[in-house]
Image (cartoon, helix red, strand yellow):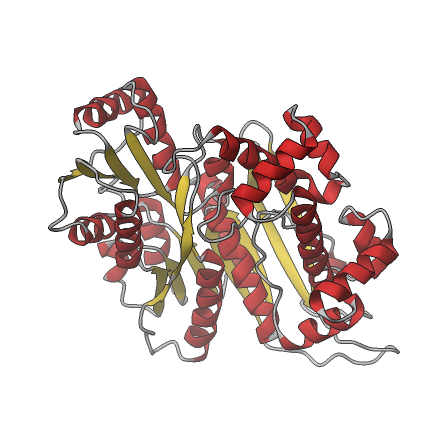
Amino acid sequence: MLPDSLKRRNATLCGNGEIIYVIFAKILVDSKILVDFGIMQYHCAPQTRPRAVKKLPSADIALLLRLSKSSGRDILHGFSTAVRKMRRTWQLHVFNYDMMRAGEDLDRLREIEADALVVHGTSAETDAILASYPVPFVFIGPPSDAILAHTGPAAFVGGDDVAIGTAGAHYLKTLGPMRAWGFVGANNNLERAEAFRAALAGRNGDVRIYGPDITVETDVGRLAEWLRALPHPAAVMAAQDAMAFTVLDAAARAGLRVPRDLAVLGVDNDELICETADPPLTSVAVDYARLGALAANAVKRLMAAPDIRPARCMAPIRSVVERQSTRPMTSGAALAERAAAFIRRNATKGIGASDVAEHLGASRSLVDLRFRQTFGESPHAMILRLRLEAVKERLLTTGHPVARIATDCGFRDANRAMHLFKERFGVAMSQWRRARRSDSPPERRPNGMSSRETAFSHFKDHPMQST
């Protein structure tokens, strides 16, 4: 429980005009993820002396999000960023939807007496919650028939499933001639599967849809047999990254070589899944942060006019992030990919080009040559670029002095960092910070190097570049 002093919706604090987040969490060690947590937000008006703070519109918002997935965490980031821009003193009660216990957590949800509800995903439990909740709700994702039939104040936001399925098909067509095409997970997202099939109409090769759920060991065995029966080479798209991860496992059991025999594509660009897959997984990146922002704006509209049901809003895809599951690699490109992965993990930890070569067990000149051939820049240049991007992130998301930010991002010499920043972006760090904070929300940086000081890390990649 939080002390009463932290339960106020407005706080008279000296600050820089940002929303201050107070985060409390309960950790479930066995699952290694946040079970549930709440976020209380305070709007702190800039001030130089104590004075009365004007109360802003306040509300309690309950969010049921799939926080074990990067999509859920990105939705939360986009939602909270939009709330800050709207200058609302909303108190957010966040539940990890994947770990909700039917009794205890649902009782806690009812006790909140929220003014609005935001839900990511559907299940029988979700339908029951919404059916008994007499407040506006925003649903993120494909809604069930029961939810669509709900007559209360509601709004729906989601990814553009037709665009996702079509983009996946068009990308796979660029890989060259295939004897067969497949979609795995139609039961989870029929709209994506049908769009995938339609985009491949008239293309040489069979288009096959694998619909059964994949939940137990025997299901993976059946999937392996289905993959083995495809004419090869073949290309397969899965409805989500987690399912594509299982496709890679099934392909290995079937004795198929990825990507030579079977190219595999996922959806969501969940970096934890994509980078730990063997081989690393190519994925369609959906702008889930944008979905979170759309959800926040939908809550605002519903609370202002509950009798008006907004049209369904859809966020576009961002890109296809290409990795080895769809691209054969030469030994030189593989060396460069390993170097880039090491740099992305460690750029802010003070590494240099010599550390990259030592990690790979290769000469620095060879690593530099292969890296330039693959990425068009040297390892040293990538390290500096990622450090400067990390500096930009911290300038926006922290109030730390610029010298501290420079050293935290891996620069040994803060003055050198300030010089490089001005040389690269044309303005000093402090000027850049003031301009961006007054004009725009924090940027969503690419390259998987986020240093946002919240409960989560957010990972993104360059469009069509290896990670």
Q: Is 467 left, or right, of 177 in this rendering? A: right
The percent coordinates of residue 316 (x first, y second) are: 38, 62
Image quadrant assignment for residue 427: bottom right
Closer-to-camera residue (363/322): 363
Of residues 183 and 397, the one drawn nearer to the viewer in this rendering: 183
Q: In the displayed structure, does residue 46 sit left or right of residue 163? A: right
Q: Is residue 410 visible?
A: yes
For the point 31% across and 25% down, which residue is it? 251
Q: Is residue 2 left or right of residue 183?
A: right
Give coordinates of residue 261: x percent, y percent.
Answer: 28, 28
- Residue depicted at 69% across the width and 46% down the height: 383
Of 27 and 440, the residue lying toward us: 440
Query: To which quarter of the image does residue 212 belong?
Result: top left
Q: Position of residue 222 (x, y in %)?
A: 22, 23
Q: Quadrant of residue 358?
A: top right
Q: Position of residue 318 (x, y in %)?
A: 43, 58
Describe residue 159's horizontal placement relative to residue 8 as left or right: left
Residue 452 at least partly seen: no
Residue 219, relative to residue 131: is it above or below? above
